[in-house]
């Protein structure tokens, strides 16, 4: 709509003069008749075309999908930050030669407390390990640090680091952070008989290029591994038997964003409440509430349907070679079994919801083979198909448009008229007004002195338009109004619709359009600089 309805006023004259000697700058009056805008607007300009489809008879329908809720991975579990710290000392003083091993393949194991969730493996989407070594050995030492249970392309995470020699009581220190993105963690522990468990190992030796060094029982090594910000991309195991209370909460609904007033009645609505489950998890869902919220009017309508307050059993998805096969549960909401029609005619900008999800209500029936992908999550959504057969009463739409009118300083506006020619092919009349906005977004003035009405097109006995109807609206422009237009960057377009055959429903067809032409008749005084 924006690309066709912005009123852009162009510069009207480019003047060329031969050189002449004059005591004063020349000026003269001129009358100019110029087309300013010519456009044809169809139903796609009133509603986003991405939600409109044509039926076989060319009548239009709204097809729209809106997510209500998505079950995020961190609702099921979170991997907390954790540190593994180990102290190593030599029981008795001993002199180590260059290249000699001080600590050989020391393994440390840690188990996460995930509150009933038992993970066997996970692929890390993002996360880090910070590795710190403090050495009181007075010679350079080499370390081989690895996380044998973490593999990337089948290769365990392994690094080789060098730690400076201690100086007196000041330890040599090594600090480094490593990215674990993409690593697959086996969380079954060293002997593969645990869950939520990872392990690390390291070997320390005196640098082969160093000198023999005496290590006392006070010359300790302190090794600290800190795993943090671990976000799984995939996880497999048993996600526990637990209950999640969701909401009360709200989600945005954008279909009626441009409507600010009036009412619309739909002849029919076809809705499905759909639950898609791409998680390897059985669940039981209770919808406590689903509501249509219009924050403009403050009106809320709660869904009345048997799905409210009753258990819905959701079967787990399956996977094969990385391919996921979701399960679907679809619950039709019609005018016969619910008040969904009234909920949509409420023109909501939000949906409210409150629900409860019981995970694995039958326990660990998968044998610890639950699975989840970070980008494939259980969700509840509304799928809707609404035929555009409507009754509209003072249905008011608004839009903000850019305006750019320039004055090069050589022309002085004296008077003029802007005339709107509207050839309307829609079966409703449209009351039109446009407002000039100041820099703060407030209304500075209106373009029209009064609201102007574009007549509706005539219809036949089948309530279908038989021909377009022309309306002509002339608008005088004062000098003050023109000055205000020069300084305005945005305008607010406000249109109020009323269908022709109230209370009968009228269908909207794809060929319906309104042809608009805006013509300016201006008187200027042109002055040469």
Image (spheres, rainbow, N blue to C red):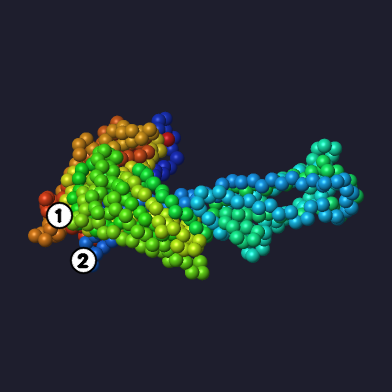
Q: For residue 20, which quarter of the picture?
A: top left
First along the sequence among labels 1 and 2: 2
Q: For residue 448, which quarter of the picture?
A: top left
Give how far across and how far down residue 496 sits, in percent: 21, 44
Residue wearing tag 2: 57
- Quarter of the figure that contains the C terminus: top left
Residue sitting at x 37%, y 59%: 314
SS class, disc 2: loop
Give how far across and how far down residue 151 sits, in percent: 64, 61
Residue wearing tag 1: 505
Give how far across and how far down residue 8 sits, in percent: 34, 45
Residue sitting at x 33%, y 42%: 400
SS class, disc 1: loop
Q: Nearer the viewer, residue 441 or 485?
A: 441
Q: For residue 360, which quarter of the picture?
A: bottom left
Q: Nearer the viewer, residue 247 or 404?
A: 247
Q: Nearer the viewer, residue 62 or 155?
A: 155
Give how far across and how far down residue 361 sits, in percent: 40, 56
Using a 10 Å C-alpha cutoff, classify the residue at mark 1 as few (fewer than 14 neighbours), some (14 to 19) or many (20 or more). Answer: some
Q: In the image, is residue 445 above or below residue 60? A: above
Q: Is residue 426 visible?
A: no
Left or right of residue 169: residue 494: left
């Amino acid at each position: 709509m924006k690309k066709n309805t912005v009123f852009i006023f162009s510069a009207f004259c480019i003047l060329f003069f031969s050189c002449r000697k004059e005591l004063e700058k020349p000026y003269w009056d001129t009358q100019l008749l110029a087309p300013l805008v010519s456009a044809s607007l169809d139903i796609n300009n009133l509603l986003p075309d991405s939600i409109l489809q044509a039926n076989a008879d060319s009548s239009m329908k709204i097809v729209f999908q809106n997510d209500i809720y998505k079950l995020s991975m961190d609702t099921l579990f979170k991997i907390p930050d954790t540190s593994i710290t180990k102290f190593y000392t030599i029981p008795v003083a001993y002199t180590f030669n260059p290249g000699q091993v001080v600590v050989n393949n020391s393994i440390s194991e840690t188990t996460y407390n995930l509150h009933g969730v038992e993970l066997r493996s996970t692929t890390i989407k993002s996360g880090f390990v910070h590795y710190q070594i403090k050495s009181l050995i007075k010679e350079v030492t080499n370390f081989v640090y690895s996380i044998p249970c973490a593999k990337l392309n089948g290769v365990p995470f392994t690094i080789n680091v060098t730690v400076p020699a201690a100086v007196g009581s000041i330890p040599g220190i090594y600090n480094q952070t490593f990215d674990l993105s993409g690593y697959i963690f086996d969380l079954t522990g060293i002997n593969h008989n645990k869950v939520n468990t990872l392990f690390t190992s390291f070997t320390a030796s005196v640098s082969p290029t160093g000198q023999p060094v005496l290590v006392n029982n006070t010359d300790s090594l302190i090794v600290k591994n800190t795993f943090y910000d671990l976000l799984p991309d995939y996880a497999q195991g048993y996600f526990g038997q637990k209950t999640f209370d969701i909401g009360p909460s709200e989600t945005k609904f954008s279909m009626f964003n441009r409507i600010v007033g009036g009412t619309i009645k739909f002849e029919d609505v076809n809705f499905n409440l759909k639950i898609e489950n791409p998680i390897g998890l059985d669940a039981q869902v209770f919808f406590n509430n689903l509501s249509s919220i219009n924050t403009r009017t403050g009106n809320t309508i709660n869904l009345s349907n048997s799905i409210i307050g009753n258990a819905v059993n959701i079967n787990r998805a399956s996977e094969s070679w990385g391919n996921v096969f979701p399960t679907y549960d679809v619950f039709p909401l019609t005018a016969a079994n619910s008040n969904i029609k009234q909920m949509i005619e409420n023109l909501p900008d939000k949906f409210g919801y409150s629900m409860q999800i019981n995970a694995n209500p039958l326990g660990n029936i998968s044998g610890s083979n639950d699975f989840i992908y970070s980008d494939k999550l259980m969700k509840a959504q509304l799928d809707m198909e609404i035929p555009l057969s409507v009754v509209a009463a003072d249905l008011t739409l608004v839009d903000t448009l850019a305006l750019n009118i320039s004055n090069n300083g050589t022309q002085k506006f004296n008077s003029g008229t802007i005339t709107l020619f509207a050839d309307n092919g829609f079966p409703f009349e449209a009351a039109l007004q446009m407002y000039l906005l100041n820099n703060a977004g407030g209304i500075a003035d209106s373009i029209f002195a009064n609201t102007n009405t574009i007549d509706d097109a005539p219809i036949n006995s089948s309530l279908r338009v038989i021909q377009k109807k022309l309306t002509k609206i002339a608008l005088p422009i004062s000098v003050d109004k023109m000055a205000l237009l020069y300084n305005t960057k945005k305008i607010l377009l406000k249109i109020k619709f009323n269908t022709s055959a109230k209370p009968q429903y009228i269908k909207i067809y794809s060929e319906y359009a309104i042809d608009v032409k805006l013509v300016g008749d201006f008187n200027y005084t042109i002055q040469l600089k």
